[in-house]
Amino acid sequence: MSATAGRGSRWAGRGALLPEGRDGAVTAGGADAIGAGMLEGLPPHRPTHVLRLDTSERAARAMTDLIGEVFDPTETAVAAFEAEDGKTWHLEAYFSEEPDEEAVRELIRPILGDAADEAVFAAIDQQDWVRASLEGLKPVRAGRILVHGSHDRGRVQPNDLPIEIEAALAFGTGHHGTTLGCLLALVDEVKRRRPQRVLDVGTGTGILGLAAARLLHSRVIAGDLDPEAVATARTNAAFNGMANLMAFYEAPGLRHPLARVARGYDLVFANILARPLRGLAPSLARAVATDGTLVLSGLIPRDVPGVLSAYAAQGFRLRRRRLIEGWATLELRRGGAAPRPR
């Protein structure tokens, strides 16, 4: 993502997922306002080094885009967030291997000038990384669905549908507004009807697919272009006793035989980024059954009009928009009358 959503907002580069920053905490108003401790996406596996820098909004946006384009998205993660003063932006970039500091400084120098020399590089203690995972992994509820860590098993109630995530796999869970918005959309859809065929595109750690499988007791197809993400999602499915309800594929978008069904899917999730969502509009549209629902997320508010336009061209209309912690989740259906504003 390459734009902001107001004070306290964040954006992530491709594949990004980072711990919540200490400043600029995100809040959301209304009934859907639920605290979160994570940005959603794919982290580098066991990151070892981090770059930290305070800069302007313009420079932070440009650096986020640049790092997201130059580095392998499975090996790096970058995010930026606004400080309380409303002027400074904190940028953090995580690397799975020690970066060439001078090369990185030269990469960002056209954006920052001499301020590139102020970038701070540091090694990450693996114990600190796991501890951060546990601190961020607070139980998150959407209806009866409860995403939690092993340290919160005692909070699971008899009627809950729990999804437990191991501490080492905590990043990429349902704690960011995008995933939470999708979980709430799932709960709403099941109240309306019970989808029989569900697809999760860009599954990450598999939380949306696992939640659908748990709630519906039916098989869910989930895919991601990142092999590490698919491996993590499989591990999470097995850990939760749902390996038999999940089928995973490794491919970009829907470019895999598993993603193709004759009658289309009753419910499709795509919690990724605005640009790929626009590019995937034709293939996602073909994947949705005539009376199916398409749930899109990973969007900041200024991304929404462009994404809606791309899907309107495919015959979809907005049914509901959720805004949680500055992130938008869209529920779309084919044709029909436009909904009243919410």
Image: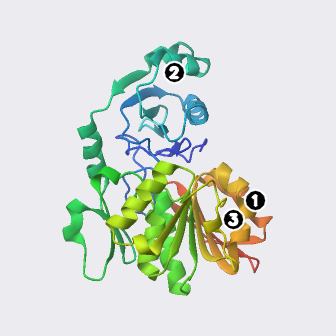
* Of the image marks 1 and 2, the number of the one nearer the N terminus: 2
Instruction: Provide residue 158's location: percent of width, then percent of height.
Output: 25, 82
Q: Is residue 41 visible?
A: no
Of residue 67 and residue 109, the one placed in the foreground of this image is 67
Of residue 87 and residue 133, the one placed in the foreground of this image is 133
Whether 50 is drawn above or below 244: the answer is above
- The answer to which image quadrant residue 33 occupies is bottom left
Three-letter code, disc 2: Val
Left or right? Give the position of 333 relative to 164.
right
Mark 2 and mark 3: span between their CA atoms?
A: 37 Å
The residue that mark 1 highlights is 310
Instruction: Provide residue 29's location: percent of width, then percent of height.
Output: 46, 62
Instruction: Provide residue 180's location: percent of width, then percent of height.
Output: 45, 64
Which secondary structure lies at badge 2?
helix
The residue that mark 2 highlights is 104
* Of the image marks 3 and 1, the number of the one nearer the N terminus: 3
Which secondary structure lies at badge 1?
helix
Q: Residues within 10 Å of mark 1 (few under 14, many from 20)?
A: some
Of residue 246 and residue 317, the one placed in the foreground of this image is 246
Three-letter code, disc 1: Ala
Q: Residues within 10 Å of mark 2 (few under 14, many from 20)?
A: some
The reply to whether dot 3 and dot 1 touch (C-beta < 8 Å) is no
Three-letter code, disc 3: Leu
Q: Residue at x 75, y 80 (%)?
A: 337
Please identify the quadrant where the C terminus is shown.
bottom right
Judge depth for marks 1 and 2 and give the one in front.
2
The residue that mark 3 highlights is 284
Mark 1 and mark 2: span between their CA atoms?
A: 35 Å
The total number of labels drawn is 3
